[in-house]
Image: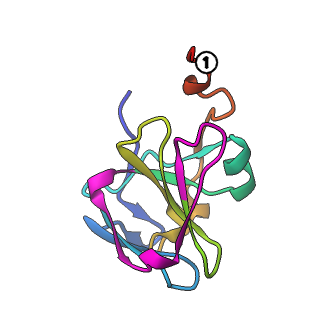
Amino acid sequence: MSATRIRSVGGTTIGPIHRATCHCGAVELELRLPHGIVDPQRCDCSLCRRRGAIAATVPLPDLRVVRGHAALRLYQFHTRTAKHYFCSVCGVYTHHQRRSDPNEYGVNVGCLEGVDPLLLDPVLVSDGVHHPSDSQPE
C-alpha cells in the first residue's frame, strides 16, 4: 500500500523543511518533510482517543528539537515502548516515538506551522486498541 502524501493544506504549502511548535512556543521542532505530510492518521488507543491529535510519520533523523528540549516531558504507559512528548509549559503533545516502528516519530499535525488539521478529511484511524505488539507471546 502506498503512503498518503499531502503537500499543501488550505493555503499552506508543506516545505521540505517545516517548523512545528507547541501552543506557547517554548518547544520548536524542525522537520524534514521532502514528501509533505506523510500518512496522517488518528489512533484509537486510550491515550490518543483522549488527546485527539492527528499524527504524521517522520523518520527519527528527520526531526530536530530546535528550541525547548528542557521544556519537553516524556510520558509512557502500558508496554512503555512508545515515547510521548509534550510541552511542560502549555501541555501540548508535539510528537512521539512510535511503538509500531521505533525508527519513526508521529508528529502532531496541529503543531505544524500554518496547518489547520481540521482541513484534513477524511483521516485514517489506526487500531491502537488491538496493537500487534500486544498479541506477541512474552
Residue 77 visible to an observer of this rendering = yes
> The N terminus appears in which quarter of the rendering?
top left
Q: Quadrant of residue 44?
A: top right
Decide whether residue 72 is among the magenta residues.
yes
Q: Percent x, y for residue 19?
A: 37, 74
Amino acid type at image mark 1: Ser
User: Considering only vertical position in the picture, is 58 above or below 45?
Assistant: below
Closer to us: 40 or 74: 74
Relative horizontal placement of residue 7, taking residue 117 as reference (left or right): left
> The C terminus appears in which quarter of the rendering?
top right
Q: How many marks?
A: 1
Dot 1: within a 10 Å radius of its alpha carbon, few (fewer than 14), some, or many (20 or more) residues?
few
At 44% from the left and 80% from the top, the residue drawn is 68
Q: Which residues are magenta?
A: 58-84
At 57% from the left and 85% from the top, the residue drawn is 24
Relative horizontal placement of residue 64, taking residue 129 as reference (left or right): left
Closer to us: 77 or 12: 77
Decide whether residue 103 is among the magenta residues.
no
Q: Percent x, y for residue 25?
A: 50, 85
Residue, disc 1: 135
Q: Quadrant of residue 113?
A: bottom left
User: Considering only vertical position in the picture, is 122 above or below 115?
Assistant: above
Closer to us: 128 or 15: 128
